[in-house]
Amino acid sequence: MTHEDLTAGEGGLAGVTLLPGVRLAEVDACGLEALLAEPAGALVAVCCVRGQAELALPAAASLSCGEVLSLVALDAGEKCRVRPQEGPFRGVALVASTDAVAPGAAATLAGFDVDLAELVAATAAAGPVTDAAGSAVSRAFLDLAVGARGEGVAALKLRCVEALRCLCEARHQAAYARRGPVTRAEIARCARTLMRQNVESPLTIGELALRCQTSPTVLKESFRAEYGMPVHEWYRRFRMLRAADLLSVGSGSISDVARAVGYSNASKFAQAFSACMGATPSAWRRVALTSAAAPTPELCEVG
């Protein structure tokens, strides 16, 4: 897919359909206005890559470089403008319509913890939400913007799914901050998000339970019911998958990788890695760096 494939189209707002019902587009100021005229109920998420924009929504909003604005389109009457002193506005946008998402695409997204209907409902309830520059959402969308300039559709699909997953986690975390996790499924999702965010300095079961506003017993029962394994096992596997990624890149020593996933003792890290991945860290790195068919951590990836 070329840059022209991504941007060519009517009205300055075109793009490429990455999944049925999910479209990616690069937008300027006019394209940003067009986004707000999407059919009612469509999820619109825009990341500012350059410049700055002011939007006339039900409440005034601004969008600066690195920030991501997400909202559910209401009608065609919304407008935006770019502040002249910031120069031309450029952004990358995902537009998702739950009505157009095929069952197969919905199942694929669900496999990556993306429930579009739930995301749309959460975004509609929260109103226009801006995720800050530097946040997980911002990083995912900026990666998407970089990919839009030179990657094929297959790679962009993965970046798109990651961006949507980050949006889902951010909306879940915001809901937890307002009222705390309510159902056992929410408790499990909250714990999993916290574990993903704390790899270098792993949290104890007690710390996880405290942050999820529940007891250790309820946390463990909820997690096993939702994900089919003990919470400590999921955490260990996730950390080993992160270590596998670092080893495959080839940067840093084995001790550096061990510290990056929360092990101060390289020997204990090597034992845990071998038990999970079926190879020692050094063997994994050697195969990854010398073979065209690098090891595939997805074979034991956790959900």
Image (cartoon, grey):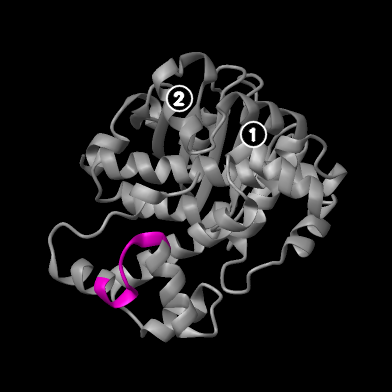
Residue drawn 36% across the image and 61% down it: 277
Residue 132 versus residue 281: which sits nearer the camera? 281
- Can you give x and y, in whole percent of width and height, for residue 285 in the image? 26, 73
In the foreground, 300 or 74: 300
Q: Secondary structure at mark 1?
A: strand
Nearer-N-terminus badge (2/1): 1
**How many numbered marks appear?**
2
Label 2 – label 1 distance at C-alpha? 23 Å
- Is 21 left or right of 235, judged from the image as shown? left
Is 240 on the left-hand or right-hand side of 62?
A: left
Q: Which residue is mark 1?
A: 71
Q: Quadrant of residue 278?
A: bottom left
Quick check: is 282 in the magenta stretch? Answer: yes
Amino acid type of the residue that numbered disc 1 sits on in the rendered structure: Leu
Membership of 195 in magenta stretch:
no
Residue of label 2: 107
Boundaries of the magenta span: 276-283
Picture quadrant of residue 222: top right
The rendered magenta stretch, by its main secondary structure, is classed as: helix
Image x and y of residue 136, in percent: 57, 56
